[in-house]
Amino acid sequence: SAVISQKPSRDICQRGTSLTIQCQVDSQVTMMFWYRQQPGQSLTLIATANQGSEATYESGFVIDKFPISRPNLTFSTLTVSNMSPEDSSIYLCSVASSGRQTGELFFGEGSRLTVL
Amino acid sequence: AQSVTQLGSHVSVSEGALVLLRCNYSSSVPPYLFWYVQYPNQGLQLLLKYTTGATLVKGINGFEAEFKKSETSFHLTKPSAHMSDAAEYFCAVSEGAGNMLTFGGGTRLMVKP
């Protein structure tokens, strides 16, 4: 398993500002995934963050809006840039298990952003 | 490409009644299948998973699911609902270990006294 800590757990932001979400894992992992959960909706993958290379973004998400850093195997950040009310969501960091891969992803508690 | 469909965005059962949450998937490769639960204001917790082997898998809190390849389904059941089961349930599929998960739309389970 993996223990994932996200900061901030929640925040209220002003339109036009940017916010960086941090994700810390208690073990080294190869791939980290960033998901978005809009109010009352399911989870949508934003991007896959690999250490030492550019993140891979899903359709509908771009690096300018959601820049991602992955400086080492236990840490990643997701920035939500130039925020608008439509960006109000829960952003979740997730990882596959370290060591023997068993298929499931482990999730942080999420960062709940409200944009006014 | 893979996708997941959960029939019924809201399901309401009485306490003690059978819980049945439906999940159908599509995948171009043998799938890994998962059910996650999300309690209010919390992250996602794995209930159970199917990767290979026995098609009936048991998870935490008395839940189980059966992988039916012919029906491309992975429905979640629990014989007797408890008030504490009220939550959002997500079915997900992946193409193997270490890969991203694709989630269904979620089903909100409500349990009536």
Image (cartoon, coloured by chain):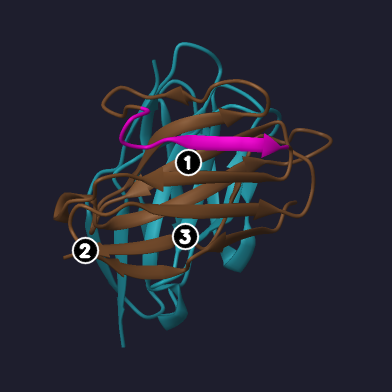
Q: Residues within 10 Å of mark 3 (few under 14, many from 20)?
A: many
Viewer-nearest residue: B45 or A86:
A86
Q: Residue at x 39, y 15 (%)?
A: B1
Tell me which segment is drawn in magenta. A63-72
Q: Amino acid at mark 2?
A: Gln
Q: Quadrant of residue A13?
A: bottom left
Report whether B72 appears left or right of A61: right
**Quarter containing the C terminus of chain B:** bottom left
Viewer-nearest residue: B96 or A84:
A84
Residue at far front of view: A17
Q: Tag 1, which chain? A: A
Can you say whether A28 is above or below B62 in the image? above
Q: Tag 3, which chain? A: A
Chain A tint as drawn: brown
The residue mark sitting in front, 3 or 2, is 2
Q: Which residue is mark 2?
A: A14
- Residue A92: x percent and y percent? 46, 51
Viewer-nearest residue: A18 or A36:
A18
Q: Which residue is mark 3?
A: A110
- Residue A20: x percent and y percent? 44, 52
Q: In this rendering, does residue B55 appear at all? A: no
Q: Amino acid at mark 3?
A: Gly
Q: Tag 2, which chain? A: A
> Which label is found at residue A34?
1
Chain B tint as drawn: cyan
Q: Amino acid at mark 1?
A: Trp
